[in-house]
Image: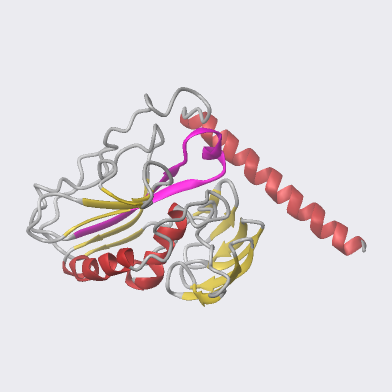
Amino acid sequence: MKYVRRWQAAIAAVIALSFGLSFTKTALSGERPTAGSWMTAPRHSAGIAPDPQQNAQTAIVQVYVASTFGWRGMFAVHPWIIYKRANESHYTRFEVVGWGGSNVVRRDYAIPDGLWFGAQPQLIVDHRGPAAGAMIDRIEAAIASYPFPHIYRSYPGPNSNTFIAHIGREVPELGLDLPANAIGKDYRAITNPIGLSPSGSGVQASLFGLLGLSVGLEEGLEFNLLGLDFGIDLNRPALRLPFIGRIGFDDTTRRIDDSNVTPSTAP
């Protein structure tokens, strides 16, 4: 019994530490999770995506995450994917949004690299060149095959993280690794509790995203308990923790194989 209490105390300590770090990060970033209205929150470009007109000859695929609006920003993130084929001068953006219509899968709901209701987006996947172009048909097929286009639940899913995780499973060459605070990425229907991990590089067993285990090249080893993820990433060494996401080395997947790409002018 004393060992059970020790494990409970250890888990509680990790949760408290992770929440404290997330709260501190939010405060230092200047993002106030409960301040203002979503209607007036800034959604301008973060200046991260390469200029699509200057890079018209280059195929580009990127995935972003940003803190969700309001108090939930200290707990979870919202992701989306953008892409353009070679010889295109504009991006297409896809994500899941839980309001404003019966079909929650939205195309071009916002500008490609815009702030998510005031939250600065973080780039987690960046592919440019012929290999990126080769992914796009499969990305679009994955979007079309998303099994929950008319269902949205912020917790435990399916939600925006479930959607991007589905794309990651269907297109493993993305090298997608959603952070531990991407609540909903582990959601699986009761009829399909075992399968590929969200990166497509490993295996996962999960009961509605509330209890599970993932092992993969991108995710490392990750446990899920009541929607909270704990683990260790050995690919790019880091701890995977709820609320804060990860502590350790940067985990952005970058594969740039085209010399025609013009770098972003963002600072």
Quarter containing the N terminus: bottom right
Q: Is residue 9 above or below residue 33?
A: below
**Where is residue 37 shown, x and y percent of the image?**
44, 24
Residue under the image location 59 percent in, 35 percent down: 23
First to last magenta residue range: 60-80
Q: In which quarter of the image is the C terminus?
A: top left
Q: Where is residue 232 in the image (x, y as percent from the top left)?
A: 58, 63
Residue 117 shown left or right of residue 53 in the figure = right
Nearer the observer, 15 or 156: 156
- Foreground residue, 152 or 229? 152
Query: In percent of the image, x 12 and y 61: which residue is there?
Result: 259
* Magenta stretch encompasses residue 66: yes
User: Which of the pair 178/139 is nearer the observer?
Assistant: 139
Drawn side of residue 56 relative to residue 166, left or right: left
Taking depth in this image into account, of 228 and 144 the one nearest to the observer is: 144
Coloring applied to the structure: secondary structure
Q: Hey, which residue is sitting farthest front in the picture?
A: 102
Magenta segment includes 70: yes
> Quarter of the image holding residue 174?
bottom left
